[in-house]
Image (tube, rainbow, N blue to C red):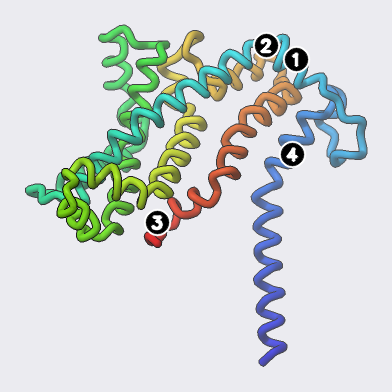
Amino acid sequence: MKNNKIIANIVKYAVLLLYTVIALFPLYWLVTTSFKPPLEVFSTQPLGTFVPSLENYKVVLFNDMFPKYLWNSVIISLITVLITLPVGSLAGYAFARFKIKNKDNWFFMVLTTRMAPPVAFAVPLYLLMVRFGLVDTYVGLIAIYIFMNLAFCIWLTRGFFEEIPPDVEEAAMIDGCSRLQAFWKVTVPLTAGGLIATGVLMFIFTWNEFFFASILTQSIAKPFTVHLTSFFGSKRILWGELAAASTIGSLIPIIFAIVMRRYLVRGLTMGAVK
């Protein structure tokens, strides 16, 4: 019995190790390529068997427009989260607490915006942006991302609010709080972890978005994800610069996710309220 348990543990950790290696290999390739000199880019030698070079990072950071477009991504992602999270969480609270006629049907209609492929909205949204003169503007791109993330925010926060017993808010209202005060002083603190997780996930989704950004931006509001395609030349691909830019662009959401990993796991697993 004891031997079976040991074998099961070995198999379990072997599978986890294999999965980790497979999952991290693209990141390993990306980082090692970013440090390779141009003549070593296609070499299969691992990091440490060649002389690492910062030349690719120098080109990307000081001789390219990459920092500007990276800053665009920061601004667009943060503003999207700061607007979507309050609006979406209030809507999620309404779905969780109030009696709404045909609530499930309304909720399903909200979720359809995330079920349909983004390309289904491309033409009408592009024509709408052209009509209002919002092509290649921060406002236009942020509006699209709010539209795309709002359903996800409502769906996730509704689950968090439903975990809070209504009795807790009713007790606060008996003590003199209004409905809004009970929400702000009691419900929000109890669901703070879930709200932070929702914000982190929306930031990552917005940061990684490429499709709408490639259609609706040209130069002013272009995020770094679209700018990465500029390293694909007509005759050659600048693999070293592309890897360096991708590594820098990946660092921000990775660091953000590591710092917020406790809340992120809770958000992904829809954990319970303590």
Q: Earlier in the sequence, mark 2 or mark 1?
A: 1
Marks 3,2: beta carbons within 8 A: no
Residue with the most extreme front position: 175
Q: Bin the neighbour count of mark 1 within 10 Å (Cα to Cα): few under 14, some 14-19, many 20 and up.
A: some
| 10, above or below 179, in the image | below
Question: Which mark is in front, 4 or 2?
Answer: 2
Closer-to-camera residue (109/272): 272
Res 68 quadrant in image: top right
Query: Sequence-wise, which precedes: disc 4 or disc 1?
Result: 4
Q: Nearer the viewer, mark 3 or mark 1?
A: 3
How far apart, in angstroms, are the residues tagged by discs 4 and 2? 23 Å
Give me the disc on residue 64.
Answer: 2
Structural distance between the alpha carbons of marks 4 and 1: 20 Å
Question: Which residue, given by chain and number where applicable, does mark 1 sit on?
Answer: 59
Give the secondary structure at mark 2: loop
Q: Is residue 14 left or right of residue 133?
A: right
Q: Amino acid at mark 4?
A: Trp
* Numbered disc 3: secondary structure: loop
Q: Nearer the viewer, residue 177 or 60?
A: 177
Mark toward the start of the polypeptide (3 vs 1): 1
The answer to whether marks 2 and 1 mark residues whose Cβ atoms lie closer than 8 Å is yes
Question: Residue at point 92% right, 30% down?
Answer: 51
| Quadrant including the N terminus | bottom right
Q: Position of residue 93 (x, y in %)?
A: 24, 46
- Identify the amino acid type marked 3: Met
